[in-house]
Amino acid sequence: MEVMEPNIHSFRNWLDKHGVDHRNVKMRTGQSGVALNAAVDLVASSHVFSIPCQLLLGPHQVPNIPSFIPIYKYLCDHTEEKGGGSSTDPPLPDPQIVLILLLLHTKSHPDRLEWSPYVNCLPLAFPTPLYLLARKEAADSAGGDAYDPMERIAGSPLHSILFGALEDLRAAYLTWIPELREHFGDAAFTEEHSSFLAFVWAHSAIESRAFRLRESFLNGTLQTSESVSPAQPSATTEEPYITCLVPFGDFADHAPIASATLFSTTIPDFLVFSTLEGKPVPKGSPLLITYNILSNEELLLHYGFAMADNPLDRVVVGLEVPEDQADYTLEVRKALLLDAAEQETAGGVEIKLDGHALALQNNGGVPEGLIQSLRLLLATSEELEGITTQNVVQRLSVPLSARNEEQAVGTLVQLADGMLSGYLENSSVGETGFANQWERFADIYIQSQKEILREVVKWGKERMRS
């Protein structure tokens, strides 16, 4: 992830050109790319720097990039036939695809595009598993050899989703890049920056760096100040968000407990980077923001690192309504009761199928909603006697019977034990001699997952004995 010092110098000049006062901040380079340190002692709740909105790079900038306008028009003309666009009539291109293509267009024409000094400061490679997989694939195709990131996470939930995610990216790449190259040639993307690896590079840059900004902020109608959320697919809102790269602001590193924040304000045309209340930052210390509420699996997937003792780490599990061919009516009844319970408990002690988070912060790592869900799913007709959609939540808050409780807890123990058995046996805490940063972070992720699952098993066995 090396970034060349001449690129940093050009970027500083670019910030100066656009009036960004960066005297309070020192940019440093390291294994993770460029990061931000305090150049002076910063008091709590103090302004550090402001980013003019004209420097934000996102799909909204297309009208300001003349060489990209024909490419965007081509996307608009062909999105409906290819699918994957917005729900508008006619559909608009996927904003993520537009931003990927903007990055590749900028990399292809560094001398003519306004954002080149910033894009040239982005890492040349990313330690994310998708990028490492794409790089290995490219090396294999060229008859070479590259590191295989998958061995280190064998048996983990992350391992199971990566190949599908890579194929989704390949489908998007094949939908647009060959056709745009044929139609526009180097005017769109040079050969070097139109490979699948280059496409995954751009995707990785967006996944690991982009922020989500309310459309009302970018069009100047935002009424209140608010923190800016890094781009995460789980975030939802009624108002449209636009995914943008924020030059300079996106160099800040992550911490679950941040020292600074980036937020939009009613001051027209600026994003403001400030220290948090009660969080002074001494000279030389890193400026840290919280990307989101992220487990180690999410950190590793989107950013290429994991954190030892991550207070937000969790193992997410899902359940299924048992199929009972002998009693189809019971199966349907459970599904109806589950739907009613899920709606009533949304945002609290949640009774649901998917998304139960096992975490060390819970009692034994087990959320109460998971046990209540298992009580329902494993109940017999007799145990469901008198339970209706009106009282299901109240009734599930206590054991339905000794048999049901033993089966619910035992099923959870089996689930955790099964997940544990899938991990590599030779992966051990404190292992040394990692070949690279990926191995070290992958080991942190695996060990944290195993620790949570062991605690779940321990909790379940103790509960069954009591």
Image (cartoon, helix red, strand yellow):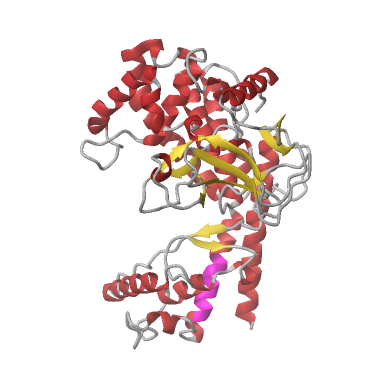
Q: Quadrant of residue 172?
A: top left
Q: Residue furthest left?
A: 89
Indicate yes or no whether the magenta region holds residue 90: no
Image side of residue 213 versus residue 16, left or right: left
Q: Quadrant of the N terminus?
A: top right
Residue 135 visible in the picture = yes
Q: Residue furthest bottom?
A: 386
Residue 199 picture location, percent across and down: 46, 26
Image side of residue 191 versus residue 278, left or right: left
Residue 398 picture location, percent across and down: 49, 84
Q: Residue at x 38, y 81 (%)?
A: 392
Residue 375 picture location, percent across and down: 45, 77
Indicate yes or no whether the magenta region holds residue 412: yes
Q: Residue at x 41, y 35 (%)?
A: 96
Q: Quadrant of the C terminus?
A: bottom right
Q: Quadrant of residue 273?
A: top right
Q: Quadrant of residue 361?
A: bottom right
* Span shown in magenta: 405-414
Q: Residue at x 58, y 47 (%)?
A: 291
Residue 25 picture location, percent across and down: 70, 35
Residue 155 visible in the picture = no
Q: Residue furthest front?
A: 267
Viewer-proximal residue, 248 or 434?
248
Residue 443 against residue 390 in the figure, above or below: above
Viewer-proximal residue, 418 or 285?
285
Count of numbered tags: 0
Q: Main secondary structure of the magenta part?
A: helix
Viewer-proximal residue, 11 or 384?
11
Q: Residue at x 63, y 55 (%)?
A: 449
